[in-house]
Image (tube, rainbow, N blue to C red):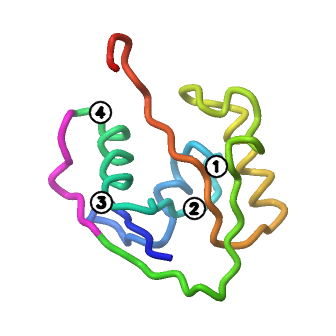
């Protein structure tokens, strides 16, 4: 499986320190997590939604990784997610991800991406 990541070049790209300090959609602070997308477009949308400035921040770089086919990848598709996971700053999404990490599920896990949509956008 190929993964795509766009991240700040001023920091190590694969150490999870950003999520460790700030948390993310599916993890609370103090949980080192690295997120990536299945497509370059998905990675680009993710960073644009996070940046909220309408363009890619200058320090961002693109990296790609290959996950060998023989490694376990567990999917948390939408039917397994708690109500409200797709709301901004969702406590239920973070609690779900924190539990996932506490259970020491496979290190390569798939979660749906989510981007806020402004009112009036189609």
Cα distance in 3D space between marks 4 and 2: 21 Å
Name the residue that disc number 2 marks: 33
Q: Is residue 58 left or right of residue 1?
A: left
Image x and y of residue 52, in percent: 29, 33
Task: Please provide the residue range marked out in magenta.
Answer: 54-62
Q: Residues within 10 Å of mark 3 (few under 14, many from 20)?
A: some
Cα distance in 3D space between marks 4 and 3: 15 Å
Q: Nearer the viewer, mark 4 or mark 3?
A: 4
Checking the image for residue 27, the label placed there is 1
**Element at label 1:** loop
- Ranked by sequence position, the earlier of labels 2 and 3 is 3
- Ranked by sequence position, the earlier of labels 1 and 3 is 3
Image-quadrant location for residue 107: bottom right
Residue at 32% over, 18% down: 121
Name the residue that disc number 3 marks: 8
Mark 4 and 2 residues: CB-CB less than 8 Å, in contact?
Answer: no
Residue at 63% over, 30% down: 90
- Ranked by sequence position, the earlier of labels 4 and 2 is 2
Q: Is residue 52 magenta?
A: no
Mark 1 and 3 residues: CB-CB less than 8 Å, in contact?
Answer: no
Q: Residues within 10 Å of mark 1 (few under 14, many from 20)?
A: many
- Ranked by sequence position, the earlier of labels 4 and 1 is 1
Mark 4 and 3 residues: CB-CB less than 8 Å, in contact?
Answer: no
């Amino acid at each position: 499986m190929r993964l795509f990541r766009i991240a700040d070049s001023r920091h190590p790209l694969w150490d999870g320190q950003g999520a460790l300090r700030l948390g993310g959609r599916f993890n609370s602070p103090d949980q080192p997590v690295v997120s990536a997308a299945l497509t370059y477009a998905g990675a680009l949308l993710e960073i644009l939604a996070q940046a909220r400035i309408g363009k890619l921040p200058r320090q961002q770089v693109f990296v790609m990784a290959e996950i060998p086919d023989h490694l376990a990848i567990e999917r948390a598709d939408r039917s397994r997610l708690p109500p409200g996971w797709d709301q901004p700053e969702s406590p239920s999404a973070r609690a779900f991800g924190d539990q996932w990490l506490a259970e020491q599920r496979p290190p390569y896990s798939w979660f749906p991406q989510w981007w806020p949509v402004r009112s009036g956008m189609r």
